[in-house]
Amino acid sequence: GTATFLLGGSICSRACAFCQVNKGRPAEVNKLESIKVANAVKVLNLKYVVLTSVARDDLTDHGAVLFTSTIDEIRKLDPKIKIEVLTPDFWGGGKNREEREILQRERLKKILHKNPVCFNHNLETVERLQKEVRRGANYFNSINLLKKSKEIAPNIQTKSGIMVGLGENLNEIKNTILDLKKVSCDQITIGQYLRPSLKHLPVRKYWHPDEFELIKNFSEKVGFKKVSCGPLIRSSYHAG
C-alpha cells in the first residue's frame, strides 16, 4: 500500500557522487506526468505515496510545480490518500543570498500549502563531506529548508536522512543528528551507503549493526519521534 514515485524525468541537473540517477541536461517536463502518476496510484490501490524528484535547477521554480500538480491529481482521484514529499533543496536563482532565501521559501510554501503529511529533505551526509558527496548542495541550505518548513507549517512532520560509510565518524554523525533536532526535525532515517558503481564514491566503512543500534538510541534519546536506523534503511523505509 506504499510506493515512491520519482518526478521530473530520469536526468538530474546535479551530479552528486553517491547517486545512480543519470546526470546532464534534463528533458522537457512531461505535462502528463502528474496524471500518469495519479493513475498509477489508483491502479496500485495505494494508501500512502511518497513523491520525490530529480533536481531541476533548469526550471524557474526548481521543480516545485512537479509536486503540487501531482498532489492535486492524486487528490482528485482520492483525497484520503496520504502524501509525503521528499524534495530537493530548491536553492538557486536570484542575484544574492537574500534573494535566493526568498525564492527558496516561496517554492517551499507552494508545496506545504498542499498540506502533505510529511516534508522530507535529506542531508545525505555530515557537514565535512557535503562538498565531496553532494555536489551543488550545501549543508546549511538544507538545514534552513527544514527550519523554514517548520516555520511555515508547524503541523507538518519533517524528516531527513543520512548515509553512513562515506568517511564520517561517530561524533560527526551525532552532531548532524543534533543539528536536525535544533530545527525541530521529527523523523530521521540512517542507512549504510552502498556504492552503485565503480564511478561512484567508494565505501570507506561498513558500520556494524551494533553501531547502528547505538546511533538509533542516541537519536531517540535526543527526542526524534520516529527513528529508522540500520544497514538497509533508505529514505522511504516504512514511510507509511
Image (cartoon, helix red, strand yellow):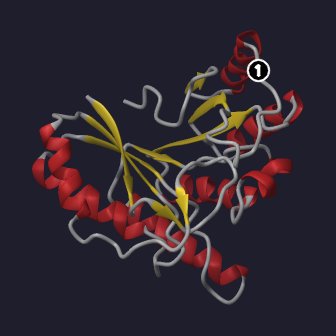
Q: Position of residue 173 (x, y in %)?
A: 80, 33
Residue in view at x 71 percent, y 18 percent:
212
**Between 21 and 6, which is closer to the camera in this rendering?**
21
x and y percentages locating residue 236 in the rendered image = 46, 35
Q: Which of the 4 image quadrants contains residue 187?
A: top right
Measured along the vertical axis of the image, is residue 148 above or below residue 40? below
Question: What residue sits right under mark 1 in the picture?
Answer: 207
Examine the rendered structure and indicate whether residue 74 appears above or below residue 193. below
Residue 14 percent location from the top left of the image = 61, 65
Q: Is residue 222 left or right of residue 10?
A: right
**Residue type highlighted by circle 1:** Trp
Residue 31 is left or right of residue 240, and the answer is left
In screen coordinates, is 185 left or right of 125? left
Local secondary structure at mark 1: loop
Q: Residue at x 62, y 86 (%)?
A: 94
Crowding around mark 1 (Cα neighbors within 10 Å: few <14, some 14 to 19, many 20+) is some
- Residue in the image at 13% along x and 39% along y: 43
In the picture, the quarter occupied by the N terminus is top left
Residue 49 spot, x, y in % from top left = 31, 41
